[in-house]
Amino acid sequence: MTAYVIVHANIKDVEKVKEYAAIAGPTVAAAGGEFVSAGEVADVQVGKLGYDRAIVIKFPDKETAKAWYNSDDYQAAVAIREEAMDAVFILADDPNQ
């Protein structure tokens, strides 16, 4: 069943984001994932989100998504991510499958 990693983030350091993206970005494709959306939050229809960026990454299944997140390749970028942004990572199933 397809799974999505949904990231909500507030940028703290733009230069660190570039450094993080250069390391973390290629790990997504290498793990079988693909970016569906990435950028500023366009609009919040109800409530208050509290984050200015949203990223959606599609994986073939939850196990693949978890393996990507826990991989040595991705984990090498985590310390930089923590300097670059405050983020929440959510793992969600595709409800249409």
Image (tube, grey):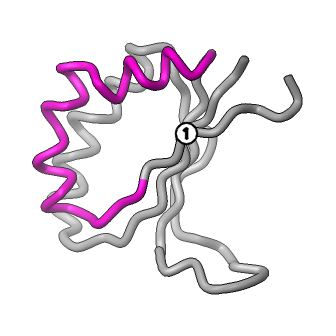
The quarter of the image holding the C terminus is top right
Q: Is residue 44 magenta?
A: no
Q: Which residue is mark 1?
A: 91
Q: Which residue is at a point 11% across and 47% down the rendered structure image? A: 79
Write the start and end of the magenta stretch as one range: 61-88
Left/right of residue 88 with respect to residue 83 in the rendered view: right
Can you say whether 89 is above or below 76 in the image?
below
Q: Quadrant of the N terminus?
A: top right
Question: Residue 60 location in percent, x, y?
Answer: 62, 16
The residue under the point 61% across, 35% down is 4
Q: Residue furthest right?
A: 96
Q: Using a 10 Å C-alpha cutoff, classify the residue at mark 1 as few (fewer than 14 neighbours), some (14 to 19) or many (20 or more).
A: some
Q: Residue at x 25, y 29 (%)?
A: 74
Q: Give the main secondary structure, helix, strand or loop, of the magenta stretch.
A: helix
Q: Position of residue 91 (x, y in %)?
A: 55, 39
Q: Which amino acid type corresponds to the residue marked 1 in the rendered image?
A: Leu
Horizontally, residue 84 falls left or right of residue 11, namely left
Nearer to the camera, 3 or 11:
3
With 35 as the anchor, is 82 left or right in this view? left
